[in-house]
Amino acid sequence: MSYQHTIGRKVYRFSDLKTLLAKASPHRSGDVLAGLCADTYEERVAAQMTLADVSLKVFLNEAVIPYEDDEITRLIIDNHDNNAFISINSLTVGELRDWLLRDETTTEVLKEISPGITPEMAAAVSKLMRNQDLVAVARKCEVVTKFRDTIGLKRHFSTRLQPNHPTDDPKGIAASIIDGLLLGSGDAVIGINPATDSLSEVSNLLLLIDRLRQQFDIPTQSCVLTHVTTTIELIKQGLPVDLCFQSIGGTEKSNASFGINLALLAEAYEATLSLNRGTIGNNVMYFETGQGSELSANAHHGVDQQTCEVRAYAVARKYNPFLVNTVVGFIGPEYLYDGKQIIRAALEDHFCGKLLGLPMGADICYTNHAEADQDDMDNLLVLLGVAGCNFIMGVPGSDDIMLNYQSTSFHDAIYLRKVLGLRPAPEFEQWLIKQGIMNEKGTLTSKRNIELLNQMKVWIK
């Protein structure tokens, strides 16, 4: 099906839905690299005006990647909830934007219709929205998950404590964990990116976190962000796996480049569930995504990078994840060139993920060769905080010395909680208060609990 729009005497024609989506997408370097973006600003506006008039029903009949060629397309179509879709099935993309922004479209209403929205619908409506629209609607969404504590409650804001080390040195990692805990970080997860995928090294890291968690009775969860096949093997060996991690993409080919498919993810999900390690809930999966991964793997099928990204969220929601986050600026300026593009992409990702019912967080980050700096990340931090982002990263000094990129620090989370009146996960907050790290008002105490610190120092040795 082709689409067209006239501006003045010029007629803009778009050969199919995926071309229209690509041309309507806000400018970013990845789509330029792929040759998919609008050639002019006027063409982008024409595409957006055309897209606004497309019926949502079209997205159920015109796949951007053919059904027979891609298992993610099959997942999207086969799992679409038509009952949830009924209340919005008469709308166009533009009307959906207006409907989402209405006061009558409440948190409860958004939760009800979420299973009826496909990733392509979410991507399409986001392309018509200003940054403030993306913030306003995402703020209305509430996606709550549970394992040992509760993540995603309104007026709460969590962090992944990320104590990476370039050689996986246990003492270095342990010191970073303790630093983060004493600054109120780690309620989403204590999650380590291992320097190697060695089974023995990953096992040691898992045991390290689990011993600390048990010794100090910390209501949080651990994760070593290794490949899903390694995690399955760890489970077979009886290791203490809390959350199962995997990077995912929005096409079958991009997932193949990660060495995964839906069947493998289902196996990992069932294996992790079987351990029954959660105390208050059983959300056990942790997924990371990022705009540009399909292009970098030459697996985008001519679909723009933001639409590909949102298709990855269909994969995530299949397995009831505890955490999902976009690693928004990590892939580099070839895909998101500068601070402006990174900020826009992060707001899109967060909005689309929340709209699709995911417990969405963000790694607010950039690489050192991008045209971005920490001021851009400060701006994005506040925007995502206002938008109701479930969690961010907590990295010592905001500089990940293993992955060599810039993220957010423990102090960034303290700042955001303070200026927006947000609190950690309730169970984790009670632990912080009990340990004398935080007071009942949610403020970190000026005098650290010396006894706890000394105990932790002994634990490191």
Image: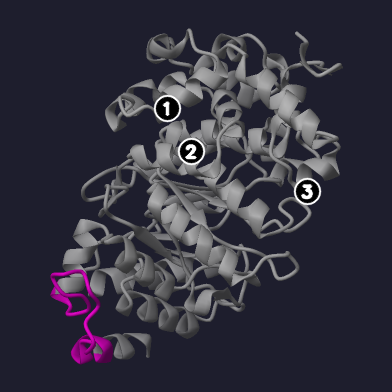
Circle 2: is it few (<14), some (14-19), or many (20+) Cα within 10 Å?
many
Q: Which callout, 1 or 3, points to the residue nearer the camera?
A: 1
Compare marks 1 and 3 and give the one earlier in the sequence. 3
Which numbered circle lies on residue 440? Answer: none
Q: Whole-percent x and y of residue 159? A: 39, 62
Tag 3, which secondary structure? helix
Between the C-alphas of marks 2 and 1, the distance is 9 Å
- Vertical placement of 362 versus 401: above or below? above
Please name the residue that numbered disc 2 is placed on.
Answer: 133
Is 79 left or right of 9, judged from the image as shown? left
Image: magenta residue range: 434-454
Residue 439 quadrant: bottom left
Is 317 left or right of 421, judged from the image as shown? right
Please name the residue that numbered disc 1 is placed on.
Answer: 100
Is 38 left or right of 183, judged from the image as shown? right
Residue 94 quadrant: top right
Q: Are marks 1 and 3 in contact (CB under 8 Å)?
A: no
Q: Whole-percent x and y of residue 384? A: 45, 53
Is 128 left or right of 8, judged from the image as shown? left
Magenta-drawn stretch contains 444: yes
| Mark 2: amino acid | Asp
| Mark 1: amino acid | Leu
Q: Give me the residue at 58% from left, 71% from top.
A: 374
Between the C-alphas of marks 1 and 3, the distance is 29 Å
User: What is the chief secondary structure element of the magenta stretch?
Assistant: loop
Residue 62 quadrant: top right
| Mark 3: amino acid | Ser
Which numbered circle lies on residue 29? Answer: 3
- Vertical placement of 155 versus 213: above or below? above
Compare marks 2 and 3 and give the one earlier in the sequence. 3
Compare marks 2 and 1 and give the one earlier in the sequence. 1
